[in-house]
Image (cartoon, rainbow, N blue to C red):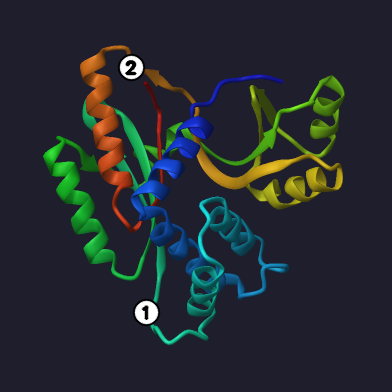
């Protein structure tokens, strides 16, 4: 199995950049709050919470911050704010598609901040399925590729993978519904899992070769990603 995906590289680079800017803590705290609110504060029984806490640990978020976010989501914290998950479909510059996921305690604020960026860049919010039809919802598991071989590939397939993209890191793609079980199966087989999460992956990518357009798309992507309420952003542009 093989393929190409810019998602993991872009996602991990952006996560590192966010950490340096101090934005990551806010984004990930929101993910933890939402996960704890939905499934409770026990990391052992709440897989979504475990994924969010793993992200927090990846950017060295202090344990106290993590616990406060868990308590807040589980209803044991002092802050009574109610958080919601919202997904926005965006028709961006040059008709490039974007999907932005947010966790927010004020949808009016979030959409106002987002529309401000869209208006400045000749973009607009799309209706339901105007962009998402061109994306698949997938589980993405990032493995340390060190020492992996053909036998490893067979073990990964046996664990329930849909596809494998092999590089320095191996990307294991699963159905959204099987992300948890495949992750657990790979752990039992002693694979070194660096990250496990859900993502929107484009069915077809649009390759941007013009440097001016590349700069415009990247600036637009970063502007949205810099919003505190935005937790993930995906695009069918490859630049």
Residue density around tag 1, few if under 14, some if 14–19, many if 20 or more, within 10 Å: few
Name which residue lies at 79% across and 43% down.
Answer: 186
x 41%, y 58%: residue: 27
Q: Is residue 107 left or right of residue 4?
A: left
What is the secondary structure assignment of the residue under circle 1?
loop
Q: Position of residue 10 (x, y in %)?
A: 45, 33
Note whether 224 is above or below 92 in the view shown: below
Image coordinates of residue 62 in percent, x first then y, are 52, 65
Q: Position of residue 238 (x, y in %)?
A: 40, 22
**Residue displayed at 49% across by 70% down:** 65
Horizontal arrangement in the rendering, residue 106 relative to residue 25 (left or right): left
| Label 1 or label 2, whichever comes before in sequence order | 1
Nearer to me, 227 or 136:
227
**Residue lying at 69% horizontally and 34% vertically, measured from the top left:** 144
Q: Nearer the viewer, residue 32 or 200?
A: 32
Q: What is the number of callouts on the image? A: 2
Q: Tell which of 229 and 138 is nearer to you.
A: 229
What residue is disc 2 on?
208
The image quarter in which residue 170 lies: top right
For numbered disc 2, what is the local secondary structure?
Answer: loop
Which residue is at the far left?
120
> Which quadrant of the figure contains the N terminus?
top right
Identify the residue position indicated by label 1 in the image: 81
How many angstroms separate mark 1 from mark 2 (CA)? 41 Å
Residue 107 position within the rendered picture, expressed as x and y whole percent measured from the top left: 29, 65
Q: Which mark is residue 155?
A: none
How crowded pointer 2 is (Cα within 10 Å; few <14, some 14-19, many 20+) is rated as some
Residue at the farthest top position: 209
Question: For residue 150, which quarter of the picture?
Answer: top right
């Amino acid at each position: 199995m093989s393929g190409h995906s810019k998602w993991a590289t872009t996602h991990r680079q952006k996560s590192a950049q966010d950490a340096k800017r101090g934005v990551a803590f806010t984004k990930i705290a929101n993910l933890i709050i939402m996960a704890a609110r939905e499934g409770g504060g026990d990391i052992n029984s709440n897989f979504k919470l475990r994924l969010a806490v793993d992200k927090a640990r990846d950017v060295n978020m202090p344990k106290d911050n993590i616990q406060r976010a868990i308590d807040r989501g589980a209803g044991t914290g002092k802050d009574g704010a109610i958080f919601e998950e919202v997904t926005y479909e965006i028709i961006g510059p040059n008709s490039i598609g974007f999907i932005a996921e947010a966790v927010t305690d004020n949808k009016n604020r979030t959409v106002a901040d987002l529309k401000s960026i869209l208006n400045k860049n000749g973009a607009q919010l799309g209706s339901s399925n105007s962009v998402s039809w061109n994306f698949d919802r997938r589980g993405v598991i990032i493995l340390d590729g060190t020492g992996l071989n053909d036998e490893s590939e067979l073990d990964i397939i046996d664990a329930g993978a849909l596809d494998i993209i092999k590089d320095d890191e191996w990307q294991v793609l699963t159905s959204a519904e099987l992300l948890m079980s495949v992750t657990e199966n790979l752990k039992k087989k002693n694979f070194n899992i660096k990250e496990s999460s859900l993502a929107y992956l484009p069915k077809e990518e649009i390759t941007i070769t013009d440097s001016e357009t590349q700069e415009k798309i990247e600036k637009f992507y970063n502007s949205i990603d810099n919003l505190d309420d935005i937790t993930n952003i995906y695009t069918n542009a490859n630049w």
